[in-house]
Image: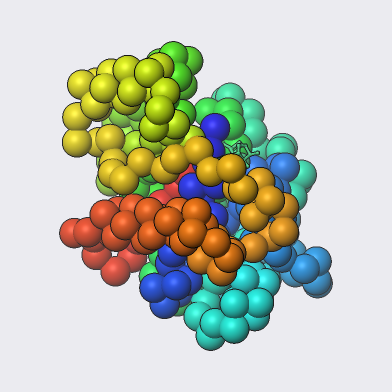
Amino acid sequence: MGKTSVTTGLASAALAAGIPTLVVDLDPHADATTALGVQPGGQQDIGRMLKSPRRARLQDNVAGSSWVSNGSSDGTLDVAVGSAFTGVYDRPDLGRRDLRRLSAVLAGASNYELVLVDCPPSLNGLTRMAWSASDRVVLVAEPGLFSVAGTERTMRAIQLFRQEFAPNLAPAGIVANRVRSGSAEHTFRLAEMESMFGELLLTPHIPEQANWQQIQGAAHSVHHWPGDSAKNAAKLFDALLESLLEGQGTARDRRQR
Ligand SMILES: Nc1ncnc2c1ncn2[C@@H]1O[C@H](COP(=O)(O)OP(=O)(O)O)[C@@H](O)[C@H]1O
Ligand SMILES: [Mg+2]
């Protein structure tokens, strides 16, 4: 839990830093598209682009996030619009040819410095399609029993996938999200994650943020939300983005889980 929130938090930080960014909304629920304030227009959504990847003209079909105009920023934050049509690819047995569909669509993404792919919750075809199109994977986990175990399982799935399909794919790390600093359970789970994953556990951690849903519901960027707690969250995403980009080349693809 927290994939979309971390994706949009990083997108907000990238916009503030002036990094030309594309968010690919691969979740059939299209939460990232909603949170980024995309106005429905004539664009082809990502589901339709995946259907004919070689004919898809990504650059003609991305939508601009309303964060850019609302924040009176002149940066680039584009969205490959999410849709229920992506659901047809979310099978557990997606073949090698289908797994390359997103890479083929993203061949037209050369004018972005950062591509963030927001994934659905399952580890089926869509998430694997994202893995095969990316060079780094970010995992998101809440510090609880099941999500720590789930993160370990996902790490193993990534290692296996990498051997078979994507030798260049590497885990960029794990973001601990919704951390409650006063919680003994969270402190215990964070220590457990640290001993399990070592340096892969990224810092800073993202705290439980009381007004997060309100910010997302208003389709606003955390960097333009009033108040100290939003300012603090914005700073944390700036630091997280910076630590993710450290030591990277210019073509940076990432996906969230
Ligand atoms: N740091 C946070 N503080 C408070 N609420 C959060 C935080 N991160 C996520 N949430 C809330 O938790 C729910 C699930 O988060 P979301 O980012 O949509 O997860 P996912 O994309 O993995 O399903 C959403 O309602 C979101 O607003
Ligand atoms: Mg989501």
Using the image, determine if residue 169 lies above or below residue 69: above
User: Splitting the image into 4 quarters, where does residue 170 fall?
Assistant: top left
> What's the colour scheme?
rainbow
Horizontal arrangement in the rendering, residue 183 relative to residue 102 (left or right): left
User: Splitting the image into 4 quarters, where does residue 70 fall?
Assistant: bottom right
Horizontal arrangement in the rendering, residue 127 relative to residue 136 (left or right): right
Q: Find residue 152 and report its horizontal and vertical position in percent.
A: 36, 21
Q: Find residue 146 and report its horizontal and vertical position in percent.
A: 47, 15
Can you see residue 182? yes
Q: Exactly how many numbered labels are in the figure? A: 0
Using the image, determine if residue 126 lies above or below residue 233: above
Q: Find residue 58 and report its horizontal and vertical position in percent.
A: 60, 69
Task: Dividing the image into four quarters, tell me where ligand 2 lies.
Answer: top right
Can you see residue 139? no
Seen from the viewer's position, the closer of residues 23 and 71 is: 71
Taking the spot 43% from the left edge, 33% from the top edge, the residue there is: 179
Seen from the viewer's position, the closer of residues 15 and 124 is: 15
Q: Find residue 102 and report its horizontal and vertical position in percent.
A: 54, 52
Using the image, determine if residue 86 lies above or below residue 245: above
Which quarter of the rendering shows the N terminus? top right
Taking the spot 24% from the left edge, 26% from the top edge, the residue there is: 194
Horizontal arrangement in the rendering, residue 48 relative to residue 165 (left or right): right
Taking the spot 76% from the left edge, 46% from the top edge, the residue there is: 85
Horizontal arrangement in the rendering, residue 68 relative to residue 136 (left or right): right
